[in-house]
Image (cartoon, grey):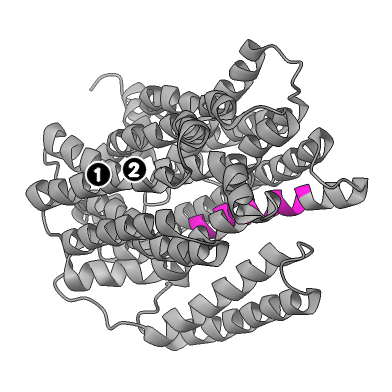
Amino acid sequence: MSDQQVLAETPPSAGAAPMRLTAMIVASALFMQNLDSTVIATALPAMARAFGADPVHMSAALTSYLLSLAVFIPASGWMADRFGARTVFRAAIGVFTLGSVLCGEAGNFPLLIAARILQGTGGAMMVPVGRLLLLRTVAKSELVAAMAWLTVPAMLGPVIGPPLGGMIVSYASWRWIFYINVPIGLLGILLVTLFIADVREEAPQRFDGLGLLLSAVCLAGAMFGFETIGRGLVSGPTSAALVGLGAAAGLLYLRHARIHASPVLDLTLFRIPSFGISVASGSLFRIGVGAVPFLLPLMIQLGFGRSAAQSGAITFAAAAGALVMKPATQFVLRRFGFRVTLIWNGTLAALLLGATAALRPSWPLVAIYALLLTGGFFRSLQFTAYNTLAYADIPRPRMSAATSLYSTVQQISLTFGVAAGAAALEFGRTLGGHRAPDLGDFSIAFLVVAGASLLAIPLAARLAPDVGAEMSGQRVRGEARACPGR
């Protein structure tokens, strides 16, 4: 695709103020989701005691939500085109808020899982449709800035979540970690109603119901099967059967997608190099990073013997580092470009994740904070670069399909991150004959997921040197040097 074609399909700049307002409103929903996920991670040991469950098995409270996201996200793009992005986004916030209330009211573990699945249904529409609102209203030259404005408020959730969750669990009931979503959700609904334009495609594609069913069976079977392997939650043959069912449904979907005019997950988007490589490399990176919100609070509480409040006061540092990076994102990408940034920054981020395996209670608190802050700093830049670059060469009519596919794969990788961390933890515990995980088991788990993140780097190296230059501004600077007389 030529530059002229891309620019023709790019919305004109609406000015900095409207862009920032839209990004901040969308970020309010992401703030609620990120706050929820980090608060619940801190509260898992307390919830396990309340339900009489194994703390390691409580990862199902995280993966059930992420699984629901992955199953329902494919329909988000079509729904936004059919009913309007504002309508769907507002309804998604409402469903997420209702699911939060039901989580707080859950009387047993199965009811909690069911409520988390309902939450995930709302989240499945909330995140990709919110991103779609930005992509359709912001010029590509402003997209890096828009993503930064979007992610700064959204990253406040992981910063506030761990200490808030620790305080709630230590001094109140874990149920309040879900009730706090209610005022945030109601405020988000009000802001969307007042300030967000209703963006939709004039001629939406026909809905691919069979494709959604096949993709749902594929994702649910494979992900739940991998989540339960060797965990004692279901029998080994049952786990294997679920994986096999998922694989069979996936093969059927591949055949279906080749003949359907508008499949629910448009796999032909992978032929666009900037999109395909961003998704593949970013997925491997997220497998490692997705395990951090699950592993780190458990390590501090079970391995270090700290309280939930003390755990939250430590683990928030990883998110705080991510927040610090956001103002520097535009400068780094403009200076080095996407390819160089993804290679070298990704390597540093993976190595720092692996270094988390060396954390011990004897470390000075300042050293623990320094490691977590630095790791979050580099991981944040990597996420922003992947999330922006994926849409560099996507034509405007295919934005809905791209956001659906990208968000689905993103959630799959995060879910596999939690499952991989839990499986590595279970493996170390079984190998050592421990009833409860010890620090050595957590070290093994962190090294395993860091290795997955490191595998992303060779894929990032396949990107073109000037990929995404229109977004980062690198191309303009390079042309100015080549033609100094202009």
Labelled disc at residue 3: none
Q: Secondary structure at mark 2?
A: loop
Labelled disc at residue 180: 2
Marks 2/1: CA–CA distance: 7 Å
Q: Please tell me in which quadrant of the rendered image residue 18 appears.
A: top left
The residue drawn where x is 18% and y is 49% is 137
Query: Left or right: where does residue 284 sit relative to residue 312?
Result: right
Picture layout, residue 438 above or below residue 97 = above
Query: Is residue 97 or residue 358 the one in the foreground?
Result: 97
- The residue range painted magenta reads 408-425
Count residues near mark 2 (Cα–Cα under 10 Å), then give few for <14, some for 14-19, many for 20+: some
Q: Which residue is mark 1?
A: 183
Which amino acid lies under the numbered mark 2 shown in the image of this protein?
Answer: Ile
The residue drawn where x is 32% and y is 34% is 153
Picture layout, residue 330 above or below residue 469 = above
Q: Secondary structure at mark 1?
A: helix
Is residue 162 located in the magenta-colored stretch of the structure? no
